[in-house]
Image (cartoon, rainbow, N blue to C red):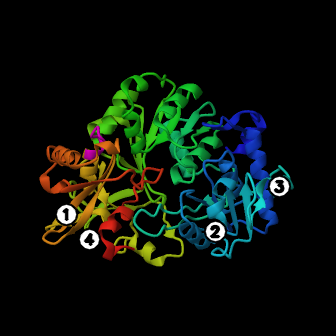
Amino acid sequence: MHPGAIAAVSPDKPAVIMAGSGRVVTYRELDEESNRLAHLLRAAGLRPGDHIAFMLENHPLFLAVAWAAHRSGLYYTAISSRLKADELAYIVDNCGARVFISSAALAEVAVSITDATPGVERRLMLDGVAPGFDSYEEAVAAHPATPVDDECQGVDMLYSSGTTGRPKGVKPTLSKAPLDVPGPLLQLIQFLFAPSADSVYLSPAPLYHAAPLRYCLSFQRLGATIVVMERFDPEQALALIERHRVTHSQWVPTMFIKMLKLPEETRARYDLSALTCAVHAAAPCPVPVKEQMIDWWGPIIHEYYAGTEGNGFLYVGSEDWLKHKGTVGRPLLGVTHICDEDGNELPPGEHGTVYFSDGPDFVYHGDEDRTRASRDPRGRGWTTLGDIGYLDEEGFLYLTDRRSYMIISGGVNVYPQEAENVLAVHPKVADVAVFGVPDEEMGEQVKAVVEPVSMDLAGPELEAELIEYCRARLAAYKCPRSVDFRQELPRHPTGKLYKRLLRDEYWPAKSS
């Protein structure tokens, strides 16, 4: 149930295959590499409960670094490789990292935060060196490939993607359990998706995000092979499923949309018959998109709703989803409640803030105000991720939008996700964001910012076409009154949209 156990019986089995370069990391290499780094961390004075951080692209040794921290009983923070210097410095400093690891590909931004992160005692760089950084390869080579004597389980402390403000560090409890003890996520994965040592798991997203990181580590506990895409490309993803006989995969809805917009002859070119389980999460999936995916791939589409915070877990398979289209599932972990602004629980069908009870607790590291804001106002200890939704009579949850994205126009609540879901499937739209902008009469009006399939299409004609398309499918007050066009929207590779960055351009007085 961990790389060392797998390496003992299948040392030459691929633990990681890099999709682009083809580089293979075997289970022997994964085990030895993580052990050497674990010894280095001990030699640097780190003990269970201490903290490291790493910012890497989807690198062949990414998971080895994670396993080194995990088997050393440490908190470890994987950081987005797309952050700017001030964002990166904030996280490294805030999490209390004593060791920081990066790569030559990211050297410029990694070096730039040195003065702003005085708590870091050791800096290591893969694939090269830079001022203030030691060579990772040389440093770990000096240490043994056997486990450290006090090996125990660590845990990730990941930061929210900062789509609505400063990133928040989600700090779970450190168990320090023996390394071979399976955690609740692995048990859920085994129950829902039936992976085994023969499984091949395709990870098309950045590994620093919660789901890819946690699922890859969980599948490696079983001895599965992980195929890692350096970056997502819709046709390459299909080719990889065929080439490596991928059995399991995890996606975000924007990836589905991009694959569905491939020409029909391209989609039909690849043999996807080995794929038995395709999981999606992280962002809302428009109903027509999921319907098309089930038509194409069959009833192997699984959805879950959860957050980095881990306070709840909802799940729905294809069969139940087709009976409850648009749902994100029913709870397998925690109990779901819908509450109004005063914390009163609402009946089925009424929209309110989604709370969880009876699930794991969490705190936002060093941020009592945000931790307090995530609790229900009546002091029952229920926690929220800030989403709005409703339950049906059978207990299935439907998400309406993020609480912070709600538009109030003329006193009426407008949830921009509805218009986004409609416009996302328009054939001339590659990506879309909908949000409120100032309006003297109504307070706010609905605005869409669209990334067209081609910027040659951008202009008044497409604007009018998209507004009419939306009004044919939704009430007029829910639809954008104007559309702006952009070459690219600021979307996180995990599928989450940095809507705050767009919205702030239209609300300069409210920018934060």
**Which residue is tagged 3?**
138
Which one is earlier in the sequence, the residue at label 4 or at label 1? 4
Question: Quick check: can you spot residue 53?
Answer: no
Mark toward the viewer: 4 or 2: 2
Mark toward the viewer: 3 or 2: 2
Which one is earlier in the sequence, the residue at label 3 or at label 2? 2
Q: Which stretch did the figure color magenta? A: 423-429
In which quadrant of the rendered image does the C terminus lie? Answer: bottom left
Question: Splitting the image into 4 quarters, where does residue 292 fall?
Answer: top left
Tell me if residue 365 is in the magenta stretch.
Answer: no
Mark carried by residue 445: 1
* Residue positioned 56% across, 37% down in the render: 201
Which one is earlier in the sequence, the residue at label 4 or at label 2? 2
- The residue type indicated by label 3 comes to Glu
Mark 3 and mark 1: span between their CA atoms? Answer: 58 Å
Which one is earlier in the sequence, the residue at label 4 or at label 3? 3
Crowdedness near tag 1: few (<14), some (14–19) or many (≥20) residues, C-alpha within 10 Å: many
Residue 95 place in picture, x, y as percent: 60, 70
In which quadrant of the rendered image does the N terminus lie? Answer: top right
- The residue type indicated by label 1 comes to Gln
Mark 4 and mark 2: span between their CA atoms? Answer: 43 Å
Mark carried by residue 341: 4
Residue 77 place in picture, x, y as percent: 60, 61
Q: Are marks 4 and 2 in contact (CB under 8 Å)?
A: no
Mark carried by residue 112: 2
Secondary structure at badge 2 equals: helix
Mark 3 and mark 2: span between their CA atoms? Answer: 23 Å
